[in-house]
Image (cartoon, helix red, strand yellow):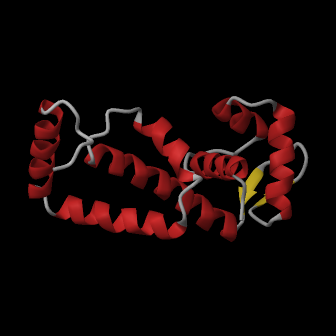
Amino acid sequence: MLSPSLEDYLEQIYRLTLSPGTVRVTDISNKLQVALPSVTKALYKLRDQHYIKYERYGEIHLTEQGNDYGCYLVSRNQLLQEFLALIGSKCNYAAEAEAMEHYLSKETIEAIQYLVAFLRDDPAWGRAFADFMKQRTEKGNPFILG
């Protein structure tokens, strides 16, 4: 199991591998806005846990395990952003998903995945939910049910 910080590094490495070219320490540093020594330290941890192949001053390559987990991390982020949009949250989806993603269990992510698929397949729910939210807001306190 990776720490939230290492998940962020692995997710970014995965995203960088989706574009042509090589992945280098400076690419990660620039994208995550962290110092080069911090990136290097994280890379050694990811390497030791067999998520990447990396030697000092070299290119960074995902292992099969790293590729699979990186794909999961990106998918999880996209799922949470879609969930936030579907429920009508008025937040910054990317920032909110980032805040949520590391603290939800796989079981909760799976439940959200089912809910999003259900909601996506039945557009009528969206209209009903929007009406519900409007009614609650018009009453002055959307949190009081009844």
Judge left or right: residue 66 versus residue 100: right
Q: Is residue 58 visible?
A: no
Could you say where residue 87 lies in the image, as x and y percent from the top left?
Answer: 27, 47
Could you say where residue 127 lies in the image, as x and y percent from the top left?
Answer: 9, 48
Residue at screen point 32% across, 33% down: 90
Residue at screen point 53% across, 67% down: 106
Could you say where residue 49 lies in the image, as x and y percent from the top left?
Answer: 81, 65
Q: What is the count of numbered marks? A: 0
Relative vertical location of residue 2 with respect to residue 21 in this rendering, above or below: below
Residue at screen point 64% across, 33% down: 31
Residue at screen point 56% across, 57% down: 73
Could you say where residue 142 lies in the image, as x and y percent from the top left?
Answer: 23, 38
**Residue furthest right in the image:** 56
Quadrant containing the N terminus is: bottom right
Q: Is residue 19 visible?
A: yes
Judge left or right: residue 57 versus residue 8: right
Q: Observer-nearest residue: 98 or 63? A: 98
Judge left or right: residue 112 versus residue 127: right
